[in-house]
Image: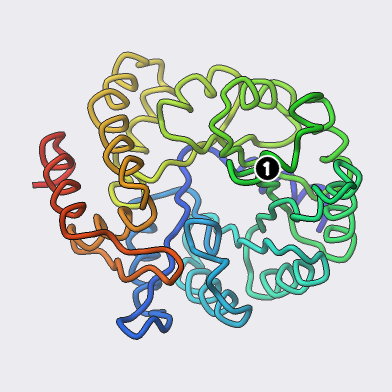
Amino acid sequence: MSTDTVARLRERLKGPVVAMTTHFKDDYSLDLDAMKRLTEYYVEQKMPTVIVTGSTGEYGALEDDERVAVQKAVIDTARGSEMTVIAGVSDMASTKAIELTKAAEQLGANGVMLTPPLAATNGGGFAVLQHHYDVVTSATEIGIVIYFSGAVMWQVQDIIANPRLMLDLVESCNGHAAGFKDASGNFPFYRQHSELLKGKVATMGSAGMNYYLWGFDFGSPCFLTGLGNIWPKWEIEFYNHLVEGRRDKALAIVKEKDLPYLTVTKNSKRYWACVKALQEMIGLPGGKMRAPLPDCTPEQRDELRRVCTEIGLME
């Protein structure tokens, strides 16, 4: 991938992003038709960017061929639209991540997203982290989004202690780093890297619109919240308010929609299942969770419906 191509990918990473769910039939087999319908919905809603087979997409519960099949369904459906598709290629083994990255390249993904390997904690620390990204990007051509979720923050303690190490990690990506997705929930960490990487890598906030409300001020060009999985218009409207200087209106969406939504979904301890349940409630493909993740209970579904009706997200 040329430097210009990576720069174009970085430029496309603006505004709201949806981390797509992966849909299963009653027998837990893939529902690719549902994935196509959901992709069509995001295209129609003018969602700028989606991530497929990421954490929300239950990539850990998918076989490699299933991941490729889901990515293909989304990429083929989005082809010809303006929507950017990022394929999740995370794996503990660098060799497997290379295989998945090459498959995503061949499918026509606009970019890939990769988390740190668990081996980064096994005495190697930052050196292992660098090596993983170096090995994968040396063997592939596509632009990459580095992804730190809350679950991996204990693997990147060196970067937390010395934020400027992120520049070294970006350098390890051999010119392929286009984005950095921060789902740590650690605002000082997010703020530091939004400032540090501005103009170099697109930092993506991933902990609700309330998190991004401030990230926007520090140079983060894009953000991800679960609200957009179900109601993209609120994320798009929120972002437009920020860009056009109507911060009071953006803040109102945070208070009236985003925070109540996050409270009811996060309190369930079954966040991804809540997203799928709400998708089904408004007529989108939802589907089951694959074990070990459980589905919502009937009581949780009732509470979701009650809260989301009260705050005007659904009738």
Residue at (63%, 78%) from the top-left corner? 64
Say which element carries label 1.
strand
Give the quarter of the image for residue 236: top left
Tally the marks: 1
- Residue 259 coordinates in the image, percent (x, y): 31, 29
Residue closest to the eye, 74 or 146 = 146
Residue highlighted by disc 1: 179
Report the coloring of the rendering.
rainbow
Left or right: 31 as drawn, with respect to 124: left
Left or right: 242 as drawn, with respect to 205: left
Residue at (57%, 74%) from the top-left corner? 67
Q: Residues within 10 Å of mark 1 (few under 14, many from 20)?
A: many
Left or right: 176 as drawn, with respect to 100: right
Residue closest to the eye, 7 or 294 = 294
- Residue 245 coordinates in the image, percent (x, y): 40, 15
- Residue 175 coordinates in the image, percent (x, y): 85, 47
Left or right: 312 as drawn, with respect to 275: left
Q: Is residue 157 above or below residue 96?
A: above
Q: Amino acid at mark 1?
A: Gly
Residue at (25%, 64%) from the top-left corner? 284
Give the quarter of the image for residue 266: top left
Residue at (62%, 65%) from the top-left corner? 109
Return the residue found at the far left: 315
- Residue 182 coordinates in the image, percent (x, y): 61, 37
Locate the N terminus and report the quarter of the image it occupies.
Answer: bottom right
